Amino acid sequence: MELPNWGIKLIRRLEEKGFEAYAVGGCVRDMLLGKKPEDYDFAVSALPDETKQALNGVPVFDTGLRHGTVTAVVDGHAAEITTYRTESGYSDFRRPDKVGFTRSLSEDLSRRDFTVNAMAFHPERGLVDCFGGKEDLKNRILKCVGEPERRFREDALRILRCLRFSSALEFAIEEDTRQALLKHRELLKKIAPERLQAEFSKLILGEWAEQVLTEYLPVFQVFLPEAGQRRSALSWLPAEKKLRLAGVFSGCTPDETARALERLRYDGKTIRTVTTLERYRQVPLETDRRQARKLVFLLGMETAEELLRFREEPELLKWLEVIRGQGLCCSLSQLSVNGEDLIRLGYPEGKGIGKALNRLLQLVLDETLENQKELLLKKAKSWMKLDCWQQK
């Protein structure tokens, strides 16, 4: 286990002033698993003001003083530094009513959610593991620190976090923790939709997402009753949020999917993409370039690509690469003529301009006419004469 040089420097700066400091939580877990942590958190025996004084000359920002947290930027790296603390009273089943500060690392670790997240590491003193987290990592087990029911009553979001870790790490859930999780699942109704969304989005990207969704379906139905309908197997889908969401809701209608996603406060673009994937999930498609161009016209390149990946259409995906590489026309903005060209040709201003441009685009998409200005104007001129004849 090795901390980056900037992390070692941070710990030494704090300890030079007489305080104790450790890397804690997820970064320690990831280092033990042989993974590179995405970020590093530190716990310190100093109070926030003492931390700032000890780091004089280092940029430090007040990011969570109520919970004893400041963020320091060391050699370009941001690190959260939190005072050893105790917590009590969780009237909203999410956040502690009272936070107290302590000089004891073991007290701080005892308030954490799961044993694998309740370890600390020091570059010289090594690993501090009061609750058997290292052994649980070895056995690929998720277990609450202390009494599971208490942990979930303190913060109901831990129920979903537990399932997210199971999905991401491919860890089984220890039986007492599992029973408590199922017993208190209704507490998830007290959690803000945005928080549920964040955890759920991470959960469905895990290798065990399908297994977790199936085994713990009653938990998900608390906030997502649609999850009980038939869904695509997630294991074969790329680990991308929109594709996995489409897999989760593949047994729903587009309207049902939209309502579920809106309830969890997903953004409009995500909702539109996921419902489009559902709408086109079983629409028959040819496998030629014309079909690919029409999909880009209808959906845009990004959504068309997501649809074809969702449906596993490798031939059409290859055609999308050709279209992208050659810059083939798939929209009015790419057409070699515009409204001003048609007006100069003699078209009267009005709706007829748009109608003619769309007819030209359809011919280009059908590949019965090349996207060349001279050819397009010639065709438009022939329509103008025909339209005049029909009007007479």
Image (cartoon, rainbow, N blue to C red):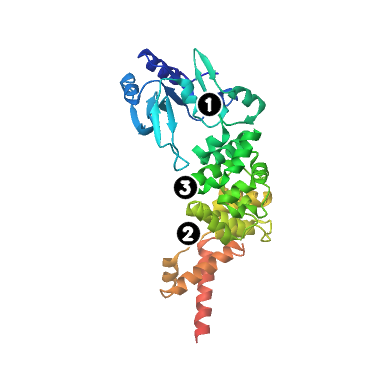
Residue 95 visible, this orientation: yes
Tell me the crowding category of disc 3: few under 14, some 14 to 19, or many 20 or more residues within 10 angstroms, Cα based.
few
Tag shown at residue 118: 1
Viewer-side label of 2, 3:
3
List x then y, in percent, for residue 354: 47, 69
Query: Which residue position is annotated with label 3?
Result: 192
Closer to the camera, 142 or 39? 142
Spatial CA distance of label 2 from label 3 is 42 Å
List x then y, in percent, for residue 330: 55, 58
Tag shown at residue 333: 2
Q: Amino acid at mark 3?
A: Ala
List x then y, in percent, for residue 238: 63, 43
Spatial CA distance of label 1 from label 3 is 25 Å
Marks 1 and 2, the one that precedes in the sequence: 1
Q: Amino acid at mark 2?
A: Ser
Q: Residue at x 53, y 54 (%)?
A: 261
In the drawing, does residue 286 fall left or right of residue 132? Answer: right
Tag shown at residue 232: none
Q: Residue at x 59, y 48 (%)?
A: 220
Residue 78 visible, this orientation: no
Question: Does the CB distance between marks 1 and 2 fall below 8 Å?
Answer: no
